Image: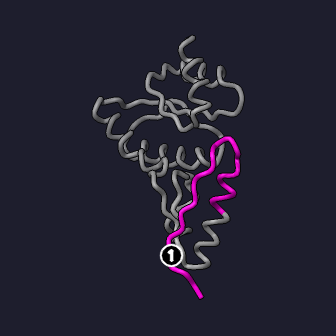
Amino acid sequence: MRSNKAVHFPRLSDEDKLELRHTSVLSHITNEISSCYITYADTHPMYTKDNYPNFFRAVPSETAFNPARVALLKYYNWTRVGTLYQNSPRYDLPHSKLLTDLDSARIAIAETQGLVEELQHELLKLKNKDVRIILGNFDEEWARKIFCEVSNF
């Protein structure tokens, strides 16, 4: 017998690194039993309505912010940007969509840099290309590192 009751599971903390596996398993299970899964804040781009029709999130995915980013750039007539993104599926996929949206809006992408371990090299490439507007897809740990490093330039 299948249940149609909504099930809410709390989001695991970023520190325990089980969030993606937790969400993946529960998303599959809730699809099989015709139930729904409401997550607190999992924004991983692999959880689309096509793949997981019973998966709902309390916050928008990272790609949902792209129209606002593009609108902000257009409002200030900024037509040339650089991008920084964290090398992980959570940020790679939204970054690819961001590049597509920027291209569609005819905003030039002067430089794109992925973040692995070395930060100075990536920021130096942006600086050497005279990038003044930088759009980023990365977590709070990388944000701290980036802002600290940029303040030294």
Q: Amino acid at mark 1?
A: Lys
Taking the spot 43% from the left edge, 34% from the top edge, the residue there is 108
Viewer-side residue, 38 vs 82? 38
Colour option used: one colour
Pointer 1 residue:
5
Tell me where residue 92 appears, x and y as whole percent: 60, 45
Q: Quadrant of residue 107?
A: top left
Few, some or many residues within 10 Å of mark 1 (<14, 14–19, 20+)? few
**In the displayed structure image, the side of residue 12 where residue 135 appears, left or right:** left
Image height check: is 50 above or below 17?
below
The residue at the point 63 percent across, 35 percent down is: 114
Residue 124 visible? The answer is yes
Q: Tell me which residue sits at (51%, 53%) in the image.
A: 40
Q: Is residue 52 left or right of residue 65?
A: right
* Towards the viewer: 9 or 124: 9
The answer to whether residue 5 is magenta is: yes
Q: Give coordinates of residue 149: x percent, y percent.
A: 59, 17
Answer above or below: position of 117 versus 43.
Answer: above
Confirm whether the magenta stretch covers residue 17.
yes
Q: Is residue 53 visible?
A: no
Q: Which residues are magenta?
A: 1-24
Quarter of the figure with the N terminus: bottom right
